[in-house]
């Protein structure tokens, strides 16, 4: 009987060790999703339209002739000039999030859309 409970305890330790890295919050917080955003007149093209909720890194690439920015979830990138690139990191909660270019007239002309965080 004693040997059996020792075996059970050993199995429990092995199982705990196996699952520890997966359950660690540190491992989870390192996960992020990268979405490439191509900007031009007057349209955004996103490499992904559905992302897991959490940290999302938007890689901004301006292939247009004018300067543009990218605003989502209350955060806004700097103004990105013609041919330039930028980055905007945001934390998205679950739901459909609207994005837009805040340069006057650009959103109305088509530089807006939504991305879904699941
Ligand atoms: Cu714009």
Image: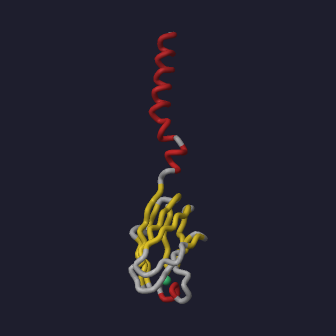
Label total for image: 0
Q: Give residue 59's position: percent from left, percent from top.
A: 44, 68
Give coordinates of residue 112: x percent, y percent: 50, 80
Image coloring type: secondary structure
Looking at the rendering, which quadrant does residue 43 occupy? Answer: bottom left
Q: Residue at x 43, y 62 (%)?
A: 34
Whole-percent x, y for residue 78 in the image: 54, 74
Kindly identify the residue that appears in the image at 41 percent across and 86 percent down: 65
The percent position of residue 54, horizontal first and vertical second, equals: 53, 58
Residue 63 as seen in the image, left or right of residue 30 = left
**Residue, x 48% and y 38% (percent of image)?**
21
Against 45, is 2 above or below? above
Query: Residue placed at 53% from the left, 89% from the top?
Result: 105
Please say if 43 is above or below 7.
below
- In this view, the residue in front, 32 or 117, is 32
Foreground residue, 38 or 78? 78
In the displayed orientation, state which residue is furthest to the right.
Answer: 74
94 sits left or right of 85 in the view: right
- Is residue 24 depicted above or below 31 in this figure? above
């Amino acid at each position: 009987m004693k040997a059996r409970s020792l075996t059970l305890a050993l199995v429990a330790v092995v199982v705990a060790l196996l699952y520890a890295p997966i359950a660690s919050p540190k491992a989870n917080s390192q996960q992020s999703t990268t979405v490439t955003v191509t900007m031009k007149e007057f349209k955004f093209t996103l490499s992904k339209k559905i992302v897991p909720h959490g940290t999302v890194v938007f890689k901004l690439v301006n292939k247009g002739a004018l300067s543009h920015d990218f605003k989502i979830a209350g955060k806004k990138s700097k103004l990105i000039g013609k041919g330039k690139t930028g980055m905007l990191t945001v934390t998205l909660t679950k739901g459909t999030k609207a994005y837009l270019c805040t340069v006057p007239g650009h959103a109305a002309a088509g530089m807006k859309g939504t991305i879904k965080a699941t």
